[in-house]
Amino acid sequence: MRIGFVTATYLPSRNGVATSTALYAQGLRALGHEVRIFAPVHPAQQPEEGVYRLPSSSWGTPTDYPLLLWPSRPVVARQPIFDLDVVHTMHPFLAGQLASLWARRIAAYRGRRVPLAFTAHTQYEQYLHYARVPRRAGSSLVRAHVVAFARHVNRVLVPGRAMAEMLARYGYEGQPTTLPNPVDLSSFALASAAEASASGSRVREQYGISPSAPLVISLGRLAPEKNLGTLLSAFDLARRNRPELRLLMVGDGPSLAGLQTRAGEGVVFTGGVPYARVPELLTAADLFVTASTSEVLPMSMIEALAAGSPLVAARSPAALDLVVPGVNGLLSEATPEALAAALTEALKPGRLPLLQQGALDSAQKYDVRVRSAELAAIYQELLNAPGKWVPGRL
């Protein structure tokens, strides 16, 4: 199959949508399919085979999040789209509109069905504080548009129950297909316990953390919707029982300066790091902690499992998808007191090794090879469906 991904964010941007898109492309190509990715121009991009850059703007946006612009006719004419068998978009907004238009044009050009798939990755209303519109009006517009777009496509995919529940709240009555985000387990595989110990020692030495200190890690964009103030408060409470406890906060974002001012002793901020270092950082930690309730199925949590770092998470749809309490982590309410108690419990010497093995075991089903084969089967099912389908206009 020739598959076209149309996305509003892609590497080197550091976010779950960009990473999962790249991993699915990797997995599908390994299965023998051709994948082309159509993504915004990024100021730090490197040439990559199979990736085609579309106009973007960084005006008024974070440097790592260039804004996709609608491409002109000459730009579209240069894109290799007219032999695509399937079009898949990661967004319901401008990238989705573009994917829909392309699917119609390709179908008309080839005289055959060209399915359009859509993965709903984001709890869109949680991010309205980034838009310059009144929240109530913005919420109504977002809900109406997302539902209209979901009804328009051939298949709606969701990474977990959080998105399925969100679409139902918005008014979408269809049944989305659950396809969890993938992880490249080979990136997290260490040849031996000695190698894992050496990797962890390098991280701890770099950030001035004692080899014997219990270490918890938080990884992701530092932004208001992540509930990071609660996380810091929980860590402060946990240190009353475990003064030697350390927290490694990996990531960058608009909340960084405020969090650095707010943080107490024992917290180390790394800033943004290259994705290639994520396995090493996660492997160095004893636990992964998150207080966020806005996540869908975050790559960072799946990657933590792959690194053998159990999850201590505030209760949320995403956490309910990923955490098997007492097996690969613990759940708590989204309060500092409850999260601190869960951290303290998970770090007990008699419990931590069992949780770490459970984390490794539970990561297997998210392997990129497994997830990509399932996605390819979904595409084939759409192609085999009866009838000639040309998407209508929204």
Image (cartoon, helix red, strand yellow):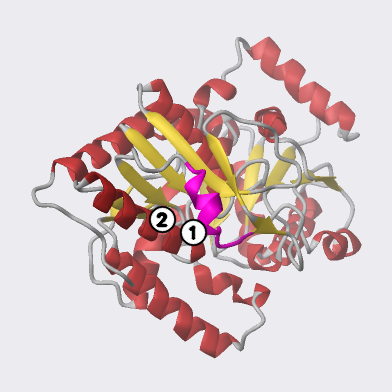
Element carrying mark 1: helix
Taking the view exactly as shown, the residue that stands out farthest to the left is 386
Residue 184 pos. (x, y %): 51, 28
Q: Amino acid at mark 2?
A: Ala
| CB under 8 Å between discs 1 and 2 | yes
Within the image, what quadrant is residue 32 found in?
Answer: top left
Q: Is residue 7 visible?
A: no
Magenta stretch bounds: 68-79
136 left or right of 266? left
Residue sitting at 55 percent across and 64 percent down? Answer: 293
Which residue carries the number 1 mark?
Answer: 95
Q: Which mark is residue 99?
A: 2
193 left or right of 239? left
Residue sitting at 65 percent across and 29 percent down? Answer: 279
Within the image, what quadrant is residue 100 found in?
Answer: bottom left
168 left or right of 48? left
Q: Is residue 240 visible?
A: yes
Against 126, residue 357 (above or below) is above
Q: Is residue 270 magenta?
A: no
Q: How many marks?
A: 2
Element carrying mark 2: helix
Front residue of 220/246: it is 220
